[in-house]
Amino acid sequence: MQRNNHLDAIVVGAGIAGLYAIYRLRELGLSFQAFDAAPDVGGTWYWNSYPGARVDSQSYVYQYWFSDELLKEWDWSERFPSQPETERYLNFVADKFELRQHIRFNTRVAHANWDEAAGLWTVETEAGERYTAKYFVSCAGMLSAPKVPPFPGHEQYKGVIAHTARWPRGIDLKGKKVGVVGTGATGIQVIQTIAGEVAELKVFQRTAQYAVRMNNERYDAKRFAEWRAQYPRLREHVHHTFAGFDFDFHLPSWHSLTPAQRREELEKLWTDGSLAIWVGGFQESLIDPAINEEVSEFVREKIRAQINDPKVAEMLVPRLYGFGTYRVPLENGYYEAFNRDNVEVIDVRATPIERFTEKGLVVNGREFELDVVILATGFDAGTGALARMDVRGRDGRSLTELWSKDIRSTLGLQVHGFPNLFTVAGPLAPSTAFCNMTTCLQQQVDWVMNCITWLRANGKRAIEPTREREDEWVRHHDEVANSTLLMRTKSWYTGDNIEGKPRRLLSYIGGVGNYRQICDEAQASGYQGFKVA
Ligand code: NAP
């Protein structure tokens, strides 16, 4: 059936950002429609329901701040909440604010075209439904296009292949022979969770990780009330720290401390058991190779101490890159899992996975018989979600084509040549990787809504960054990125995990507080550097 609806705005995605965008658009009194490919709300927290999925941000900062009532009504049960609890929270928000009525589920947007003469986006779903809208607000997520490695022979495999980001709910792994490909933040959570229940676990590891022991805590009502009492402070404070958390880089310079004092600080950070050891510890560790190596060695030592067999420890201790130059995962029993008799790590760096057979996977001529192969192989991050839609701006220019050559944006929020396209969680903003996501997503959605409000109040039809403004942002972004060690590491942070993807740090790393100020200044200046028509 063809529909032809003219709307003020279209939102893609019903995860953390999308739900908030819906709430704000309704508040502004605009006509709009949201779409999500999933059958329900949650975005990341809907799709990634794999065993052990858990938030690496503290619950008391990983939430919405827009409603006092919501803050009063929702109690978190843990310091680091599980995927089911986080998904329940997002469902609670959707129900409480009656957001579902605005979302078409099981609906993927396939094309979006800017019509310059009409000043409208024409958006078409995979089912062929067409809508027009003044504003196209993408909340499609920065880690939502799964990466599936093209291992030959997968069609003949008789077992189950499950990507963690498309987890088949209800699958039972008990007593099965299971292989896990990938040891990023996701693989680590899966491995530590299923090791005790499966018959055999084969871990195919290409790059060892610096996983830090998570210090989780269950909250009773009294303990949680202590955190709730801090909400008025937290809801302000998170917007001004380096990575949108409660903590920030706070230590004196590395060189001003004695080796014993540095050790003491690192031990404190380790005991805290959070991402503070990465984005709330020694900032110089992300810049100075010698300091980074010392911090890396501290973490390696902690890892070694958890593994019984020195040969296995050698395989699991990371050496190919420096601590914190790629997302630091938190773990809870990951290294200990490799002390179990039923768990084996297989190096697939020297000898990559060759192929699937009917029974399993082949590495270095050895066939591993597996009932289930779990792909924890990551995402086409930052750009993937939008690039797989066919988004065309002025003069038919393709966003997919642009980003296949050069990943550009202005503040990660708009792209030159694509008027009225708003890219929440787009590349070149802290929200891609260097932010407690709820902090940055709310800030970005607010920026977009303020922009739309301004356009309407000023009788303007369209906004896009000028080429010069975009060049300036990209230059600044690159300058900050190149001053850090992050560019030395190959990972999804730099697009290196996707063949042919242009290399650029996907996330702005100048700090969340600083980024927010730049965004606020753009707004306060009446969008200088943007073409407003
Ligand atoms: P990832 O960090 O990109 O890790 C993918 C893993 O798969 C890597 O170990 C990679 O090895 C491996 N891999 C990919 N292709 C392979 C191949 N052909 N053969 C063998 N190994 C292959 O992806 P992720 O673990 O899904 O994490 C992505 C991001 O999601 C995280 O960095 C984090 O930001 C987010 N996340 C957050 C949470 C949380 O907050 N709790 C949990 C999970 C994920 P190489 O490293 O050698 O490429």
Image (tube, helix red, strand yellow):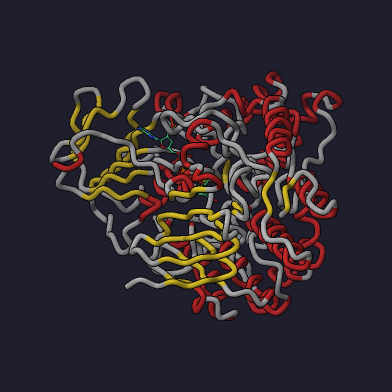
Which quadrant would residue 268 be assigned to in this image? top right
Left or right for 257, reference 2: right
Work out which residue is located at the far front of the displayed protein and give it: 117
Q: Is residue 493 visible?
A: yes
**Residue at point 18% right, 31% down?**
367
Is 209 situated above or below 321?
A: below
- Residue at 59% of width from left, 42% of height from top? 427
Classify 443 as above or below 505. below
Q: Nearer the viewer, residue 36 or 415?
A: 415
Which percent across, then down, holds residue 406? 55, 32
Ligand 1 quadrant in view: top left
At 47% from the left and 55% from the top, the residue drawn is: 112
Q: Which residue does the image show at 24% across and 28% down from the upper left?
A: 354
Q: Estimate the x, y position of residue 464 in percent, counting from the top left.
A: 67, 49
**Is residue 498 toward the left or the right of residue 21 in the image?**
left
Closer to us: 236 or 308: 236
Q: Position of residue 3 (x, y in %)?
A: 40, 72
Give the camera-side residue of 15 and 377: 15
**One can see residue 273 in this view:** no
Q: Work out which quarter of the rendered image holds the C terminus and state it.
A: bottom right
